[in-house]
Image: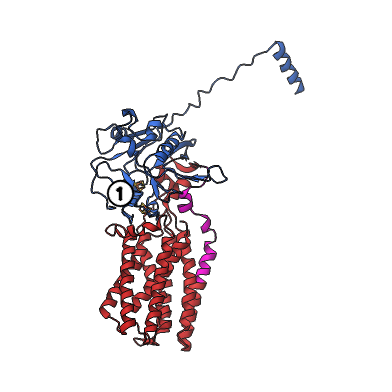
Amino acid sequence: MHPAISVIFFTVTSGAGFGAISLIGAGYPFAQGAWVAFLVGALAGGLAVAGLISSTFHLGHPERSLRAFSQWRSSWLSREGVCAVVTLLLFGLYTLIWMVTGVRLGWLGAFIVIGAVATVFTTAMIYTQLKTVPHWHTAWTPAVYLAFAAASGFTLMASLGRIDALGGWPVTAIAFWLLLLAWAVKSLWWRRALTTNLAQAGSTPETATGLGHLGKVRLLDRPHTGPNYLTKEMVHKVARKHANQLRFLSLVTGALAPIAVTGLTWLAGADRLWLLAAFILLMAGLIIERWLFFAEAEHSVSLYYE
Amino acid sequence: MTSLPPSTDKKLGLVIDLDTCVGCHACVVSCKEWNTGGYGAPLADIDPYGAEPMGAWLNRVHTYEVTPAEGPASVVHFPKSCLHCDDAPCVTVCPTGASYKRVEDGIVLVEEDLCIGCGLCAWACPYGAREMDPAENVMKKCTLCVDRIYNENIPQEDREPACVRTCPAKARHFGDLADPDSDVSRLVAERGGFDLMPEMGTKPVNQYLPPRPKTRPQASAASPAPETVEADGLLGWIDRALERLG
Ligand code: SF4
Ligand code: SF4
C-alpha cells in the first residue's frame, strides 16, 4: 500500500494524543494551577487534533468531512470520526472545568477514558477490517495500536506529571514495561505478517482470474502502458525496497533507545523529565514503523498486475 | 446509506466470455467515451500527451498467459470492471453514505456529491474496480451504464451498457442474474461461469465464462513438404545466379 505521510502522521500522533487524554481522564496527578491544566490539556488535545487535521489532507474533498460522521452504523471510518470528536469535546469541557475551578470531574473523566480507547480501537479497525490486505486483517492490529497509544501517552504524561511513583511502582518503571510490552506485541504482529502474504491467505493470480484450472497464470500485458490509481495506491512496491534497513532503524530509534533511556532513568532514579526524551525517540521510531505498516502491506489487486 | 440491502429485487450484471474476448479494448474505450459525458464527473486524464499519461477508467483489459502442466501456453484477454457484488465491502466501509447498492437492481453506485475522496472503498474492493478521479477527486466506478439501460430517449437496442453494445466479439452479455431463466443465467449454467476471488466473500454478481478447451493439431498428420518447382525466364536466371553465389 502507498504510505501516505498524512496518514502515517495521523495514526502516530493521534495514538499518542488519545493515549495521553485517557490518562488525564483517569485522573493522572499533575501539579496545581490553571496553567498546568491548560498546558497538559493543550498538549494531549493538540496531538490528537494535529493527527486528525493531518488525516484530512489525505481526503479529496476535506470540505465535506462533516459527511463522514453520518455512517457510524456501518463504517469504522465514520465511527472513528464520531469517537474522536465526541471524546475531544468532552475533553475540552473537562480541561476547561479543571482550569477554571481546579476540579477534575471523575465521572466525566471516565467517559473520556472510554472515548479515547474507543477512538484508538476504531482507528485500528479501519485497517483491520480490510480482507483485501491480509497483513492488517487480524486482531493483532488493534492490539498494536492500543499498546503503542498506551506506551506513548504514558511516557509523555509521566514526564510532566507530579508523581514519581504510581501504586508503589516508579513511573519510569511503568513506562519501561509499557514500552517493552508494546514492542513485544508489535513483534508478534510482525511474526504473523511473515506467514500471511496473499498466497498464504489463499489468494493468487489463479484465484484472481479464475483460470487456475487451466494452469499457471502470469501477466503478459498491463491494461495500459502507464501507471494508474490502482498501481500507485495499492501495488506500491518501491516503498518496500529498504524494508529491512527501515525495520532496523525503527527498532533502534523507537524501541532500543527509549527502552534504554527509561530503563536507565528508572535504575539511576534520575529525573522523570528524561521520559520526554524517550517519548520523542518513540515517536520518531513509530513514524518509521507506520511507514512499514503501509509499505509492506500487499493488496489483493496486485495479483492482477503480477 | 452504506448498509447493504438484505437482498435486491434484480441482480443486474455482466457475463464476460474469456473464450471469445479478443483483447481489442473497444469496451474500454467506449466505456470511457460514454461515462466521461454521462453520469457524474467526467473521467479525467492527467498529462495525456506527456511522458507518463494516467487517468481514470472504469473498465480495463489485462492480458494473461496461462501455462498448463503439459502442452503449450495460451493467451487470455481479461476485461475487468466493477462486479456489483452482493456482499460489497466497498459499500459498508464508506463513511459518508456516498457508496450504496440499489435495492431495485443491485447496481453499486457512488453519489459523487457526498464523496469526500477518502479512498477507503478502493482499498476494500479486492478487484481494483474503483478509481479516484485525478481531477475531481471523487471515487469513480462502473455504473452498469445506469443512464443507458433505463433511458427512454435512446433506441431500445442501445439500452444496455456501452461495453456490451460495443464488443465486436460479443464477449460481453448483460442481464438479470437473479432470474434463473434469463439469457445470462442460462449462459452461466451452460458454460460453467465462475466468481473472481470467491475467497474474499464478496459474492460478485458479474460472472466469467472460462476459455473453451483448445483443439490441438495431431502430430502424425504433418503436412507434406512443399514441392520444389523449377522456374524459368528471369526468375529462373535469378534463382540460378543466387545458387551459384552459394
Ligand atoms: S467489484 Fe469492487 S467496487 Fe464493485 S461492488 Fe465488488 S467490491 Fe465493490
Ligand atoms: S472515497 Fe468516497 S465513496 Fe469511497 S469510501 Fe470515501 S467517501 Fe465513500
Question: Of residues B40 and A151, which is closer to you in this image?
Answer: B40
Q: Is residue B232 left or right of residue A175?
A: right
Which residue is depicted at the point 46% across and 89% down? Answer: A269
Position in image of residue A168 (x %, y %)? 35, 88
| Residue A27 visible | no
Position in image of residue A299 (x %, y %)? 43, 53
In the picture shown, does residue A252 fall above or below A215? below
Tell which residue pokes out farthest to the front in this image: A100
Picture quadrant where residue A97 is located: bottom left
In the picture shown, does residue B195 fall above or below A190? above
Callout 1, which amino acid? Tyr
Q: Is residue A285 left or right of residue A132?
A: right
Q: Is residue A245 one of those drawn in magenta? A: yes
Judged by its main secondary structure, the magenta piece is: helix
Q: Disc 1 marks which residue? A: B100
| Residue A40 visible | yes
Q: What stretch is highlighted in magenta?
A: A224-251
Question: Of residues B246 and A183, which is closer to you in this image?
Answer: A183
In the picture shown, does residue A29 fall above or below B50? below
Which residue is depicted at the point 29% across and 72% down? Answer: A114
Q: Is residue B88 one of those drawn in magenta? A: no
- Local crowd size for mark 1, using a 10 Å CA cut-off: few (<14), some (14–19), many (≥20): many
Position in image of residue A263 (x %, y %)? 47, 82
Find numbered disc 1 in the image and state the secondary structure of the residue it sits on.
strand
Picture quadrant where residue A26 is located: bottom left
Picture quadrant where residue A91 is located: bottom left
Question: Chain B rendered in what hue?
Answer: blue
Q: Which quadrant is the C terminus of chain B positioned in?
A: top right
Which residue is depicted at the point 38% across and 76% down? Answer: A20
Q: Which chain carries label 1?
A: B
Chain in red colour: A
